[in-house]
């Protein structure tokens, strides 16, 4: 245990992330959001809530999906 005069109040206790590590975490977070979005859209379509699924897909274009004929498909830009 450190004595109080040895503790640096500005030290966060961990090393800052490199740019590559930040980019990797960002990509992983976006991929996870995309997968969760797909699951939600597929469930809405399964329940017959096509309009709700279309609205949700349009509100979240970063997921990359659209609803066509009651099915979730990749959006073609």
Image: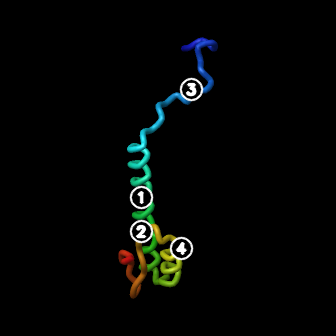
The mark lying in front, picked from 4 and 1, is 4
**Separation of residues labelled 4 and 2 (CA atoms):** 15 Å
Crowding near pointer 4: few (<14 within 10 Å), some, many (20+)? few
Circle nearer the N terminus (3, 1)? 3
Would you say the residues marked 3 and 1 are in contact, meaning their CB atoms lie under 8 Å apart?
Answer: no
Answer few, some or many: residues within 10 Å of disc 3's Cα (few below 14, many 20 plus, some between 14 and 19).
few
Q: Crowding at label 1, few (<14), some or many (≥20) Cα neighbours within 10 Å?
A: few
* Local SS, label 1: helix
- In the rendered image, the vertical position of residue 28 relative to residue 10, given as above or below: below
For label 3, the residue is 11
State which quadrant residue 42 falls in.
bottom left
Q: Earlier in the sequence, mark 4 or mark 1?
A: 1
* Mark 3 or mark 2, earlier in chain: 3
- Quadrant containing the N terminus in the rendered view: top right
- The kind of secondary structure element at disc 3 is loop
Q: Which mark is residue 52?
A: none
C-alpha span from label 3 to label 2: 41 Å
Q: Residue at x 36, y 75 (%)?
A: 74
Q: State the quadrant of the C terminus.
A: bottom left
Q: CA distance from mark 4 to mark 3?
A: 40 Å
Q: Mark 1 vs mark 2: give the one in front.
A: 1
Helix, strand or loop at label 4? It is helix
> What crowding class fits label 2: few (fewer than 14 Cα within 10 Å), some (14-19), or many (20 or more)?
few
Determine the residue positioned at 60% across, 12% down: 3
Query: In the rendering, which numbered label is found on residue 59?
Result: 4
Q: Which residue is mark 2?
A: 39
Q: Which mark is residue 32?
A: 1
């Amino acid at each position: 245990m450190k004595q109080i005069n040895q503790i640096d109040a500005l030290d966060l206790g961990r090393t800052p992330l490199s740019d590559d590590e930040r980019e990797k975490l960002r990509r992983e977070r976006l991929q996870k959001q995309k997968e969760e979005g797909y699951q939600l859209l597929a469930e809405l379509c399964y329940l017959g809530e096509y309009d709700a699924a279309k609205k949700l897909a349009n509100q979240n274009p970063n997921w990359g999906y659209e609803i066509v004929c009651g099915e979730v498909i990749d959006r073609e830009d």
